[in-house]
Image: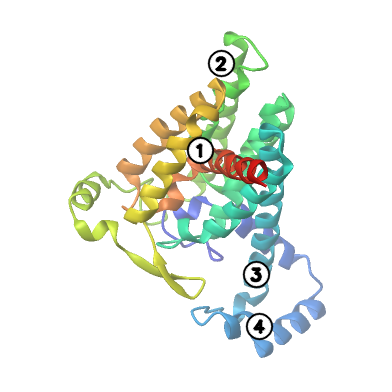
């Protein structure tokens, strides 16, 4: 990514690489040399994460990338906390629900996680916040930036239509939704044309892989080291049962617009997942993150209420 030689579609995810490269470029040479020397010698990240391999040539870019990812992660969880607290009218359930999402996020990334996944759900939560507050100007400002990070944001915008309908009639809602998607499409085409000569393609066809995976027992019992402990990963059967249980108990709590948003996200994300995504890559079900967090928060709220009533 630093040298613009990555394969497509990964090379299209340019937001953070451009930011870190431009930031390092404007640093004074003596400051750059001093910082690089210190980071190369101290190996702060490599000592803590055995699989980390940071080339000396790009040590500043790598460390800046790590720092921005952590900052964006914290910001995303803070925004999610506000969203859940506002929707549920319960700050405790909203706070715990956001914390739980933060804890579960590494499970979504266990097969393959990338820096743009963190920015993706930050932008998704921001978009939901803007739409819920009827701040469509801010939404349109956000769209090209979010699309610059990952092309799937274009499709997420379509799932926001039911939420936009809370603030506008059918015609205006359709115009806002399609306008935002058009803006995202232009941003995608702009980035795409810059890397037409890179290897790879727009996407990989994965339907045969999914058909094979569905009928393999081992597909439902993969494990990985998460938090240094062996846990289930990918489409792990106990996790699937847990999600079904959450949906069964919390779906009825959602308002009609949120149910519609969830259905839009399931259809759009589900289709893209089976067409273009490696089986088991839960990170690519990201359009359902907001729904999952909301259902989980409702479930937690019910647990807290039952506990208070008993005590």
Q: What residue appears at the point 47 percent right and 51 percent down from the top-left corner?
A: 195
Instruction: Tell me how far mark 2 sits from mark 4, CA to CA.
Output: 50 Å
User: Above or below — where is 128 with respect to 92?
Assistant: above
Cβ atoms at labels 2 and 1 below 8 Å apart: no
Counting from the top left corner in percent of width and height, residue 166 is at 64, 17
**Mark nearer the N terminus (2 vs 1):** 2
Q: What residue appears at the point 58 percent right and 9 percent down from the top-left corner?
A: 171
**Mark nearer the N terminus (1 vs 4):** 4
Front residue (pair 190, 87)? 87
Foreground tag (3 vs 2): 2
**Mark nearer the N terminus (2 vs 4):** 4
**Mark nearer the N terminus (1 vs 3):** 3
Instruction: Tell me how far mark 3 sits from mark 2, CA to CA.
Output: 41 Å
Q: What residue appears at the point 57 percent right and 24 percent down from the top-left corner?
A: 255
Residue identifier under label 1: 189
Residue identifier under label 4: 44
- Crowding near pointer 4: few (<14 within 10 Å), some, many (20+)? few
Residue 40 seen in render: yes
Residue identifier under label 3: 61
Cβ atoms at labels 1 and 3 below 8 Å apart: no
């Amino acid at each position: 990514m630093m040298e613009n030689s990555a394969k497509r579609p990964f090379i299209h995810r340019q937001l953070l690489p451009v930011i870190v490269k431009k930031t390092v470029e404007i640093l004074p040479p003596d400051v750059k040399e001093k910082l690089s020397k210190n980071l190369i010698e101290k190996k702060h990240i490599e000592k803590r994460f055995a699989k980390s391999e940071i080339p000396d040539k790009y040590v500043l870019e790598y460390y800046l990338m790590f720092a921005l990812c952590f900052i964006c992660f914290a910001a995303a969880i803070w925004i999610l906390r506000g969203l859940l607290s506002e929707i549920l009218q319960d700050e405790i359930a909203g706070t715990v629900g956001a914390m739980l999402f933060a804890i579960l996020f590494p499970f979504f990334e266990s097969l393959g996680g990338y820096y743009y996944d963190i920015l993706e759900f930050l932008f998704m939560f921001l978009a939901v916040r803007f739409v819920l507050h009827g701040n469509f100007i801010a939404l349109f400002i956000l769209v090209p930036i979010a699309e610059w990070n990952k092309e799937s944001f274009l499709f997420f915008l379509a799932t926001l239509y039911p939420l936009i309908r809370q603030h506008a009639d059918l015609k205006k809602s359709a115009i806002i939704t399609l306008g935002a998607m058009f803006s995202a499409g232009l941003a995608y085409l702009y980035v795409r044309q810059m890397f037409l000569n890179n290897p790879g393609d727009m996407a990989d066809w994965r339907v045969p892989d999914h058909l094979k995976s569905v009928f393999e027992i081992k597909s439902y019992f993969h494990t990985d080291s998460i938090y240094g402990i062996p846990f289930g990963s990918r489409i792990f059967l106990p996790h699937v049962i847990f999600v079904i249980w959450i949906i069964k108990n919390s779906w009825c709590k959602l308002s009609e617009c949120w149910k519609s948003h969830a259905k839009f996200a399931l259809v759009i994300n589900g289709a893209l997942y089976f067409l273009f995504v490696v089986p088991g890559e839960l990170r690519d079900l990201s359009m359902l993150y907001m729904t999952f967090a909301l259902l989980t928060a409702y479930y937690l709220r019910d647990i807290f209420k039952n506990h208070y009533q008993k005590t």
